[in-house]
Image: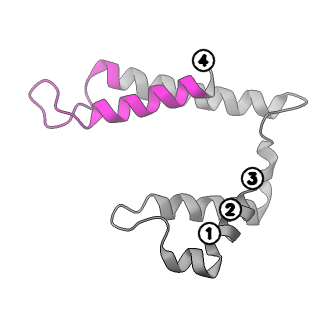
Amino acid sequence: MSVRGGLTALLAAITYGIQPYGGHNMGWTNPWVLAGLIGGTAALIAFCVYEMRIDEPMFDMSLFRIKAFSSGNSCWAARVGEPRRAAVHAHHLASGHLASAAWIQL
């Protein structure tokens, strides 16, 4: 299974996990949801392990050893994950914060 398959399985499982199932408000006990969560996570872990072992990876995982790169990615992920705020505000665009966040990730 590829990254695309792993992410698809994981996101589909999350989508169906928040829907009612079997008399419960949420469907986290649904066997298909559990299989999607476990299978998707396993596929992503397998991808990371594979990418760290080949000579010319699609994405160099050693970049996460760089403090600025890891910090930039974790801050950006935390900012996007906030439910009550938009990820990009007008003052970010005007002051160049969005461009600097994108540059750190590159």
**Element on which disc 2 rests:** helix
- Of the numbered discs 1 and 4, the one sitting upstream in the chain is 4
Q: Look at the picture and state if 18 lies above or below 46.
A: below
**Near-viewer residue (63 or 91):** 91
**Does the magenta segment cover residue 17?**
yes
Image spot of residue 60 (x, y percent): 81, 42
Q: Look at the picture and state if 76 lies above or below 42.
A: below
Q: Disc 1, disc 2: CB below 8 Å?
A: yes
Residue beneath disc 2? 102
Q: Give the Cα distance between marks 3 and 4.
A: 24 Å
Chain part drawn in magenta: 4-33
Residue beneath disc 3? 64
Residue beneath disc 4? 1
**How is colour applied across the structure in the image?**
one colour
Is residue 98 rendered to the left or right of residue 19? right
Residue under the point 52% across and 80% down: 91
- Of the numbered discs 3 and 2, the one sitting upstream in the chain is 3
Q: Which amino acid does label 2 sit on?
A: Ala
Q: Give the Cα distance between marks 4 and 2.
A: 29 Å
Residue under the point 50% across and 67% down: 88
Q: What residue type is labelled 4?
A: Met
Front label number (1 vs 4): 1
Residue beneath disc 1? 98
Q: Quadrant of the C terminus?
A: bottom right
Q: Disc 3, disc 2: CB below 8 Å?
A: no
* Crowdedness near tag 2: few (<14), some (14–19) or many (≥20) residues, C-alpha within 10 Å: few
**Does the magenta segment cover residue 27?**
yes
Splitting the image into 4 quarters, where does residue 94 fall?
A: bottom right
Q: Give the Cα distance between marks 3 and 2.
A: 15 Å
Q: Which residue lies furthest to the left in this view?
A: 23
Residue under the point 74% across and 60% down: 69
